[in-house]
Amino acid sequence: MENVKDEEARPLATSSSRFANGNKRRMDSSYNFARRFTVNNQSRMSKPYLFIITLTIATVFGLLQLVFLSSNDSNTGIPATNKFSYSDKNSPYEQIWINSRLPRWATKSEQFTKIEDSITPGERICYVHVGKAGGSSVGCSLGFQLHCTNTSQPMEGLLPQRTTRMFHADTYDCHDDSGFFLFVVRDPVKRIQSDFLYERPFSEVQLKNQFPEYYERRKHFYMDCKWRTMEEFVKYGLKKPKSDTCKARAYNALWGTKHYPCHFYFNYQFHLEGLPQNAKILVIRNEHLINDWNGVEEFIGGKKDIIPPNQTLAVMNKSQKDESDKYLSDESKQIVCRELCNEIVNYKKILKRALNLNKDDLRETLEELRQQCPEYADVKEGECPFPMPDIAEKLVNSRGYEFVVMEGSYSHNAKTLETEMHVEKKIEDTSVGEDEGDDDGYQLPPYNH
């Protein structure tokens, strides 16, 4: 692969270098916070004076953080737990992002809140919603409110009761000592194809008026580079780039190292590395949704086969697309597989850590992956054509940690956060077989140049 040269390209560190030089990183973080605070605030005092005061306060926080880390015998730069369960705050998210409110779509009804208060931390389940993996359908069935209809109802059983909080994109609202973390996963290539079309704008006017907070990055990605389908994205971004800028945007988007389509950026790696150390993982595979839901329900002590074979979950957040939207040639698919190599590695890490899946389940999914990406389905970490991205800074800035993010950080980072993207949508209920579940976005009219 040719070098990606552009002001938007960034070097990727190996995973072995992750969290190295923690003290320097903390000082850099203090300096950058003071600089952002100074630039974004109007004050009667001079900006140099304001910068010095802010830097001093940030440095003190950094030193306190260092003491905290030392006392916890942590050498990673991120502690094993932030002890959210012992907080008097109602929401871990609100404890991280001070002066912010947990988005409504990440909450559950009062009946579930009361259940959370009555169970032990070990019984709690955090729902890890990776975008465009089928998570809206599962989330609504669990009792969350993201992309749900007014008529959607949670399923019966223990799973909706025990699944108390959610981790989705930059909204981490889970107790770190939760007993389990429940992923919904989907074939990595299909997930990316789905999100490419989900975030594709109708037109520049619609994008600017309806999604002003995403205008810049979606315009840069879709409209400036003029790709409308995944096939065009591969052809003009990866195979025969229209420009070095578009080439850099294409590669960095697929690697998750620059923020263009939201769910490219908040990928499997982000959600996996955003979990506490030694988190216990459960998995529902989109391609085997009913079987895995039943398996998880039985694993946590619930009823066997609680969803009958002839029943399905209502599909939420789904769009209609024509064949040209869905088309991806075999050659283009293998190029995408190559650039998603590390994402495939993380996808397999999640599957292999799933306590509810057996060897036959893993063998089945790996065989499906080999059909999609034969050359990269069996690679291990370190064997991909490029190193695993270092996302330590990305986790701090987007997932957030109580001991890092200081008061006022939400307002300064609001333009880059994803919490504003999840507007309430009224979607008609529809049920399909689990092999047809796509969980895609809105309908796409013809493109207006």
Image (cartoon, rainbow, N blue to C red):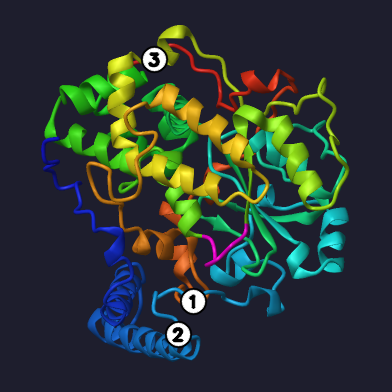
Helix, strand or loop: magenta stretch? loop
Determine whether, in the image, residue 321 is placed left or right of residue 48.
Answer: right
Tell which circle, 2 or 1, labels the residue nearer the N-terminal end.
2
Query: Which residue does the image show at 65% across and 32% down from the upper left?
Result: 425
Above or below residue 415? Residue 246 is: above
Q: Residue 69 carries which label?
A: 2
The secondary element bearing badge 1 is classed as: loop
User: Foreground residue, 71 or 238?
Assistant: 71
Residue at which label 1 appears: 79
Query: Which residue does the image show at 69% across and 79% down from the upper left?
Result: 86
User: Foreground residue, 201 or 175?
Assistant: 175
The quadrant where residue 386 appears: top left
Callout 2 amino acid: Leu
Q: Quadrant of the C terminus?
A: top left
Determine whether, in the image, residue 332 is placed left or right of residue 68.
Answer: left
Residue at which label 3 appears: 447
Q: How many marks?
A: 3
Tell me if label 2 and label 3 are in contact, CB under 8 Å: no
Q: In the rendering, at what x and y percent does residue 410 appear?
A: 48, 64
State how far apart marks 2 and 1 are (Cα): 6 Å
Residue extent of the magenta highlight: 275-280
Tag 1: Cα neighbours inside 10 Å, few (<14), some, or many (≥20)? some
Tell me if label 2 and label 1 are in contact, CB under 8 Å: yes
Is residue 419 one of those drawn in magenta?
Answer: no
Q: In the rendering, at what x and y percent does residue 303 appear?
A: 88, 43
Above or below residue 313? Residue 90 is: below
User: Foreground residue, 81 or 205?
Assistant: 81
